[in-house]
């Protein structure tokens, strides 16, 4: 059974940085493409970054050039480094399999990111 625990969110001023972490519990982590998603109030969930088993990364336009996704297969961890944060990055951030049609039905509690202007 998969469990996902996100952490690292917080309140930051525009232009600041945060590093999000996702701890995976379960088996075969190193066989999954993983992603970071976000959901702002009143908006649909959005995949912002994904990383393949070999480390190839893909970013949504919203995070391109500012976000960096990485993974540590030995530790079963996924990270999202977010730089040059903007108020529109404010959302709850989640990790799960990517793309979303492959995501597990279980979603962790997420981690709140709030960017003040």
Image (tube, helix red, strand yellow):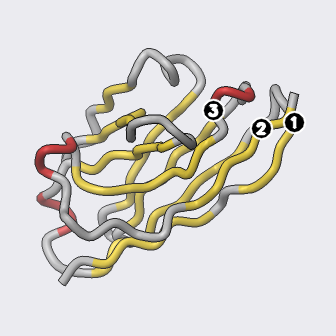
Position of residue 54 measured from the top left corner of the image (x, y, whole percent): 21, 43
Please report whichever mark, 1 or 2, sits nearer to the chain's N-terminal start.
1
Q: Is residue 42 left or right of residue 105?
A: right
Quarter of the picture holding the C terminus: top right
How far separated are the C-alphas under marks 3 and 2?
A: 7 Å
Residue labelled with disc 1: 13
Position of residue 14 measured from the top left corner of the image (x, y, whole percent): 83, 29
Q: Are marks 1 and 2 in contact (CB under 8 Å)?
A: yes
Residue labelled with disc 2: 115
Give the vertical position of 88 relative to 19 (above or below): above
How far separated are the C-alphas under marks 1 and 2?
A: 5 Å
Please report whichever mark, 3 or 2, sits nearer to the chain's N-terminal start.
3
How far separated are the C-alphas under marks 1 and 3?
A: 11 Å
Q: Nearer the viewer, residue 48 or 77?
A: 48
Residue labelled with disc 3: 89
Q: Are marks 3 and 2 in contact (CB under 8 Å)?
A: yes
* Element carrying mark 2: strand
Residue at point 58%, 54% (across, down) = 20
* Element carrying mark 1: strand
Q: Is residue 81 left or right of residue 9?
A: left
Q: Nearer the viewer, residue 55 or 110?
A: 110
């Amino acid at each position: 059974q998969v469990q996902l625990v996100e952490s690292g969110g917080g309140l930051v001023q525009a232009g600041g940085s945060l590093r999000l972490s996702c701890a995976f519990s379960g088996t075969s982590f190193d066989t999954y493409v993983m992603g970071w998603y976000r959901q702002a109030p009143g908006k649909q969930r959005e995949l912002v970054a994904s990383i393949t088993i070999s480390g190839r990364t893909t970013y949504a336009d919203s995070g391109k050039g500012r976000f960096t996704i990485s993974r540590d297969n030995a530790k079963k961890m996924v990270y999202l480094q977010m730089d040059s944060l903007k108020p529109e990055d404010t959302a709850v951030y989640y990790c799960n399999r990517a793309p979303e049609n492959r995501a597990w039905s279980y979603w962790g509690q997420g981690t709140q990111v709030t960017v003040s202007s």
